[in-house]
Image (spheres, rainbow, N blue to C red):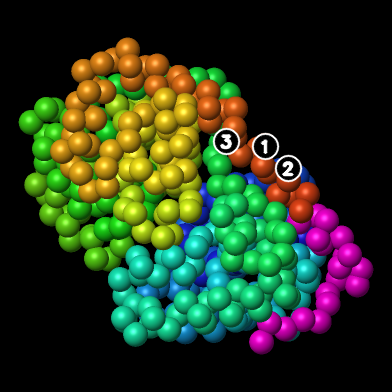
Amino acid sequence: MKVCVGTIVHHPEDARIMHRQIRALLDAGHEVTYVAPFTHCNVTPPQEIRAIDVPRAVGLRRGHALNAARGALKKGAKDADLLLIHDIELLFALPRRRPTTVWDVHEDIVGALETKDYLPAAARGMLPGLLHRIETRAERRLHLILAEAAYRDRFTGDHPVVPNTTYVPETPPPPPGANRIVYVGQLSEARGVVEMIQLARRLKPHGIRLDLIGAADAAVRPLLRDAQREGLLDWFGYVPNNHALRMAQGALAGLSLLHDVPNYRQSLPTKVIEYMARGVPVITTPLPLAASIVGRADCGMIVPYGDVEATLQAVLRLRDDPERRTVMSARGYAEARGHYHWPDQARDFVSHLEEWAAPALSPRFHQAALA
């Protein structure tokens, strides 16, 4: 099977797209063409795939990227058996003549509007209804994959859920250390950047440093640069997921201080599972799914939203109790290995695509139009 995968919004090495789904397709013996913003993100495509470079859609300036995507998807889908897209924007760039098409719904798109600081207030009021109509239209014309079971409420059909799990090492990782905490993922105000900088300042006298591993929204980059110049923390910028998780291994705790916003409320922060998989005790705000998993497995601590003092005390309690953090490390790893190991979902993911592509293999294309 030949699959064309497309994104103009996500980083080309996005963990779900590159390191999970594309890797699963390649391991199953399928050919992959990948339309993504390689040059914009300074990424060299792996030799295993056919790469088509496009501009990245950023902020309100998305027209150029969308126009380029139309030609790129047409080229990439020309001899493909299936087209897999990852952005709502690409619903407007689909070729009229295309193979079976799948939209992987990554997030609560309406709920995420609250975190889009670049959107004017008027747009935030108008967009929810428009986005719902776009989703309804796409559901009638495409196959859908959902990253969260909670997203089913937005659609009328029964669409498969492919959770955002992670690779869990076969052997238990080393126990957590005592002088370093980490955060892995995109950095933004809604993901707790302000609280993490305040926490780093209060931890410095205790000899505990904070490592931030991830790209940052434009609005918080000055804060991060100032904090790094002040010596409060180390900000490494974007690091490919597999390397980032190796960097996190051995930390005293992994932070997930997301705010209580609609886009996060229904979702499981993948970073929580990633910390568990690497034997890192979790400190999380009480988002329902994160708190449920951490509480059930007893692999971390839950702190109130925006409470830097409570987070500080949680870190110090773990620092002062090596036996407790070692037990939490082992419990988190066991829970992740037993329930959140990506290869267990990869088989179902590939099977869905193979099933959907089968009727279109000959003739290869069908006529369809979203607009």
Q: Decide which of 185, 56 is in the foreground and name it.
A: 185
Queried whether the magenta region covers residue 311, the answer comes back as: no
Q: Quadrant of residue 178?
A: top left
The part of the chain drawn in magenta is 353-371
* Disc 2 and disc 3 in contact, CB within 8 angstroms: no
Location of residue 216 by image quarter = bottom left
Under circle 2, the secondary element is: helix
Q: CA distance from mark 3 to mark 1?
A: 8 Å
Q: Which residue is mark 1?
A: 344
Mark 2: few/some/many CA within 10 Å (<14, 14-19, 20+): few
Three-letter amino acid code at disc 2? Arg
From where the camera sits, is residue 104 visible? yes
Residue labelled with disc 2: 347
- The image shows residue 315, relative to residue 289, as above or below, that is above
- Who's the residue at 59% across and 78% down the image? 134
Mark 3: give few (<14), some (14-19) or many (20+) Cα within 10 Å: many
Left or right side of 359 for 291:
left
Which quarter of the rendering shows the C terminus?
A: bottom right
Is any part of residue 215 visible from this angle? no
Name the residue that disc number 3 marks: 340
Q: Tell me how far mark 1 sits from mark 2, CA to CA.
A: 6 Å
The three-letter amino acid code for the residue at tag 1 is Asp
Secondary structure beneath label 1:
helix
Amino acid type at mark 3: Tyr
Q: Position of residue 122 (x, y in %)?
A: 34, 85
